[in-house]
Image (cartoon, rainbow, N blue to C red):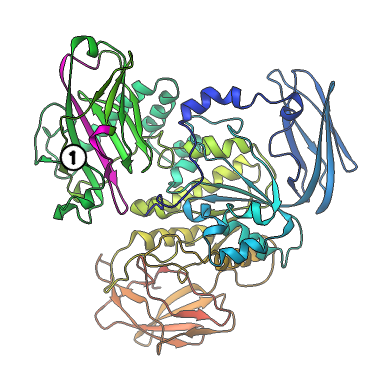
Amino acid sequence: MNGRRRPTRPRVLLALLLLALAPLAHADTPEAALLHPLIQDHAVLQRDRPLRLQGEAPAGTVVHLTLADRRAQARADADGHWQAELPALPAGGPHTLTVRAGETTRTVRDLLVGDVWLCAGQSNMELQVWRSLDARAEIAGADAPDIRLLTVPQVSSPVPLARFTEPVTWQPVTPESVRDFSAACYYFARELRKTVDVPMGLIEAAWGGSRIQAWTSGEALRAGGHPGEDLDVLALYHTDPMQAAARWGERWAAWWLQAPGVSADDRPWTDTVSGDWREAPHALGAWERWGVPELATFDGMVWYRTSVRLTAAQAAQDATLLLGPADEMDLTWVNGTAVGSSYGAGTPRAYPLPPGLLRAGDNTIVVNVLDTYREGGLAGPESVHRLQLADGAIVPLDAGWRYRIVPPQTGAPPRAPWQSAAGLSTLYNGMIAPLGSPGLRGVVWYQGEANTGEAGAYANQLRGLRDDWRTRFGDPRLPWLVVQLPNYGAPNEVPGESGWATLREAQRRVAGEPRAALAVTIDLGEADDIHPANKQAIGRRLARAARHAVYGETLAPSGPVPRSARREAGAVVVTFDAVDGGLVAYGAPGPVGFELCGADTGSCRWAQAVLDGDRVRLQAPGVAAPVRVRYAWADNPLVNLFDRAGQPPGPFEIEIR
């Protein structure tokens, strides 16, 4: 479900390495360091509000700024940071900004003033124009000098970063610059400019497979009730990764021993072997290809274990455990102590071992691999797994591996908080914090696939993220546009529960709050591709949502919206608002996808639906006392209800009043 197997821009180095190299990466000239990297040639500044600028200069230096006919000055504090505010400018340009601090002067040219949008999320936001529908023609025809693009480097960090660890650039839209940019974000701005004719600045911050928790600050997670011990381990990881790994192993072990079906003496990470362990193929690789019936379509956890014999001299050395990639997540133990956990299907693992952990004789190595989408497992062949000793010697893990399948009812484990896309605050720290606090017109949020397994918590998580970023960017009314998850997967034959539907309902409810809007995509997905290519349609729907929620146009922002469900003459009648030109059901005598449900789980039944103006009349003889209505409640529901403007109602669940 996380979209991790599509091509992406190259991943960054491990967070700690990035932090260590950050000063080197930013050995900028004084002129370059004088301004925040977002303020450079071809940048777009937010119109009609004070312009917040910041940068670095020697402590105590007075900084003078001139932009158009606006002037301001600031003084660098004891740490060398300065910030200033210039009076607002209307849309237009190009302008030239001059910044002077002592003998150092920086001139920024071709600045435009318009609307700046932050487009963030996981792989469907990251999906590039070259992978979208009609990509060749779209790229060849891309010529929009008043739309400017900036891509935030993909960086994960356990602590907030003040600066980018890689250079960033603003680029006007050309065939070369747009090719690798977010398709959804670009098509949104292109469509929006048909009615909002001002320059557009687009900032893309996206990472495939990312969970919403990774984009939320630590402070907001704590305020939202996330366990403080997880965030404490994340803080420890910044200073002592080995100790943090060991502590996380204890936290994980406590979860395991409380999981359904796990006995108190079942500790697979130790030397004690219990349960059904089998010999693994020497090639390892995706377990779906092993020819084991139980693993043919298995998504979940599998334990791996092997051993390595060391001499006393070898065991006394510092060592690093090197493993091939684990698809998609691992927690690894050596001699009963957790030594590391990583996320990423294509990322080899490298875990330094604490001094004294290894011993002369046999040493036990245990890897728990969690996979949630398609193929999973520990990569092979065996030769890629080894111990590297301090003296340079390599000890292969060639004693053979055994494996044990974890029953699905055991549940999903907690995830190490430092993991990149699956961690806590990691992407906020590495990709959002370095943005500073630029003026924004709004945020476009396209994420959720990675959270469908915990969809019941998503509404509060999304509110927490929204409020967190509103605080971060200094605008308590910052508009928030949400792309609702599209249809995906096998169609359902009978009504049932769906994590995707539950998460869509959370998105709908949060997007219905002030200064927000929803782009419905329930008719735009693809059953066998989690990355639908028709991002142009998504861009059009996002632009429509923005025109209503941000620019105040009186049009239906996201298709028909359910207003009420009431009992009437032996039926249940659902009334819709925001219907443009009337409701229509295509390809059938009436709408499909409606359910009437009783109070109990599993009580939902398909409803016979008849159009009645802007209302739909429902009957389901198998439900004696319905209390709620569900519509399009499945991973991949069949829908045929639209309004005359071609907008579908989004999936929903409402109570009958």
Quarter of the image where one finds residue 323: top left
Nearer to the camera, 151 or 415? 151
Look at the picture and state if 450 lies above or below 224: below
**In this view of the protein, which residue sits in the foreground, 149 or 336?**
149
The amino acid at mark 1 is His
- Location of the N terminus (image quadrant): bottom left
Relative to 499, residue 59 above or below: above
Q: Secondary structure at mark 1?
A: loop
User: On the image, numbered disc 1 is attached to which residue?
Assistant: 282
| Residue 564 relative to residue 406: left or right | right
Q: Is residue 539 visible?
A: no
Q: Position of residue 633 (x, y in %)?
A: 36, 68
Q: Residue at x 79, y 45 (%)?
A: 111
Left/right placement of residue 398 relative to residue 132 reads: left
Q: Residue 341: where, in percent of width, then height? A: 33, 33
At 49% across and 85% down in the image, what residue appears?
A: 584
Q: What residue is drawn where x is 74% and y is 36%?
A: 53
Is 272 within the magenta? Answer: no
Give the magenta part as a residue range: 357-383
The answer, for residue 494, to whether it is visible in the render is yes
Please tell me whether residue 602 is drawn above or below residue 235 in the rendered image: below
Task: Report whether 455 appears left or right of 138.
Answer: left
The one nearer the camera, 550 or 379, is 379
- Which residue is most to the right? 69
Alpha-carbon neighbours of circle 1 within 10 Å: few (<14), some, or many (≥20)?
some
Give how far across and how far down residue 424 sits, in percent.
43, 37
The residue closer to the viewer here, 339 or 116, is 339
Residue 399 horizontal/vertical position (percent): 15, 29
Report which quarter residue 608 is drawn in: bottom left
